[in-house]
Amino acid sequence: MYIGGSLFLLAIGAILAFAVQDAVNGIDLVTTGYILMGVGVLGLVLSLILAGRAGRDAPPPR
């Protein structure tokens, strides 16, 4: 999952948690939103860490 996908999950989670007032039988949309936001934050942090590592492993410019 890259930065864009993480931001997408974060946005969809925030919409479900804070903006949707509907109810679906068997699914708690607020909890689902919080879970998606957590996965988005985790993916964003991991993407930034991996991007930082990739930048350090590159050879220096000449």
Image (cartoon, rainbow, N blue to C red):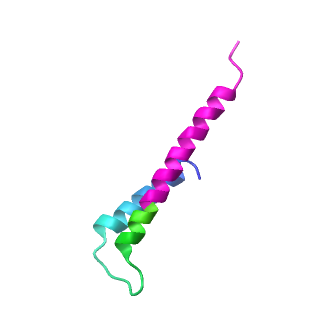
Q: Can residue 12 be found in the magenta stretch?
A: no
x and y percentages locating residue 50 in the rendered image: 61, 40
User: Residue at 42% across / 59% down in the picture?
Assistant: 37
Give the residue furthest to the bottom.
25
User: Residue at 71% across / 21% down in the picture?
Assistant: 59
Q: Is residue 3 left or right of residue 19?
A: right
45 or 58: which is nearer to us?
45
Q: Is residue 14 above or below residue 43?
A: below
Q: Point out the stretch of residues depicted in magenta.
A: 37-62
User: Residue at 53% across / 54% down in the picture?
Assistant: 5
Q: Determine the image quadrant of residue 49.
A: top right
Label total for image: 0
x and y percentages locating residue 25 in the rendered image: 39, 87
Q: Is residue 56 left or right of residue 6?
A: right
Q: Is residue 23 above or below residue 44?
A: below
x and y percentages locating residue 16 in the rendered image: 36, 68
User: What's the magenta bit mostly, secondary-structure-wise?
Assistant: helix
